[in-house]
Image (spheres, rainbow, N blue to C red):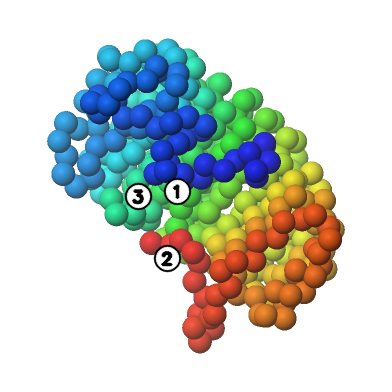
Amino acid sequence: MDHTEFTDRVDGLYDGTYAGLPIAIPDSGDRTPAADQAAWRIAESVYDSGEGYEQRFTTFLEKTDTAAVKALIIGGWEEAYDTGSSRVVELLARNADRLPALRSLFLGAMPSEECEISWIQQSDVTPLLEAFPLLERLEVRGGTGLTLSPVRHGNLRVLRFETGGLPAQVVRGVAASDLPALEYLELWLGVSEYGGDATVADLAPILSGERLPALRHLGLQDSEIQDEIAAAVASAPVVARLTSLALSMGTLTDAGAEALLSGQPLTHLARLDLHHHYLSDEMTERVRAAFAGTGVEVDLSEQEDPDDDWRYVAVAE
């Protein structure tokens, strides 16, 4: 799976599709699609609870041919800004036998109007990978309280964590996992203020690629140590097998770009995503010139200006 195949990112959820399927809401009053023809979104209001998430999930199980469901989107649960997702995870894991066809799962798909990304209270998501050995795609939004233990999962192809601060424990959990089928890995590392305490050393096993033989896209994004990450990526063994690389959304400066230009060749990539950066005009042109005529699509949009040397990532709170 290269970057062009993976176009329905989180914003796409609110454009009506997920995992290549139209999004449907159970019992919405609209014409109900077949269970395998929709990505089903189950959510409760974060601030004004009505039926309750557990009741909504139970009703979904009772009224839907869940044996055919391919994709689930878990939106808000009651007081998600104060209550972790452990009950939601437990409900999913406990009912895994009723969802044998599930291949795509998004946990915490809430718009910022409902709950800011760093307000979302998460929990241990390891049980999801253990309960669904055939899952191909797992995405999680929100890093507060998030944990992941090392696992072996033979079928996962896409793993994404969207956070304003990704705990180092989660990064180490990913790095120590055996994921032989994983093709697409995206980590929004965030800032220390919101729990993003991972270091380049934590990323080292990922950059070696030893446990990720199928990896084709790597995103190490939204980081306040983006220059350090770029320097590590410049000599990382995993890069040679990638078709796309994202070091976007963070505080990348000329120092990080210089490291990339001085490191191993990147002209084998189809896409290099550096959007939201702090490169000077001169360095921006150097990067463009370095890839001119190579066929590499380079995203250098959102050139930011530092405020008295203060640089901000794209997504924090």
Percent across and percent down for residue 216 are 71, 42
Total marks placed? 3
Three-letter code for the amino acid on which mark 3 is drawn: Pro
Q: Are marks 1 and 3 in contact (CB under 8 Å)?
A: no
> What's the CA distance linking mark 1 and mark 3?
9 Å
Q: Nearer the viewer, mark 3 or mark 2?
A: 3
Circle number at residue 111:
3
For the C terminus, the image quarter is: bottom left
Q: Is residue 188 above or below residue 290?
A: above
Find residue 191 and report its horizontal and vertical position in percent: 48, 63
**Whole-Å distance between the Cαs marked 2 and 1?**
24 Å
Label 3 or label 2, whichever comes before in sequence order: 3
129 horizontally vs 67: left or right: right
Give amino acid for label 1.
Asp
Position of residue 32 in the picture relative to residue 157 (left or right)? left
From this viewpoint, is residue 87 visible? yes
Tag 1 residue: 11
Residue at 62 percent of width and 25 percent of height: 155
Seen at 24% across and 37% down, the residue is 44
> What residue is shown at x 70% (from left), y 60% (from top)?
298
Q: Are marks 2 and 1 in contact (CB under 8 Å)?
A: no
Mark with earlier residue (2, 1):
1
Q: What secondary structure is marked by label 3? A: loop
Q: Are marks 3 and 2 in contact (CB under 8 Å)?
A: no
Mark 2, secondary structure of its residue: helix
Q: Nearer the viewer, residue 90 or 317?
A: 317
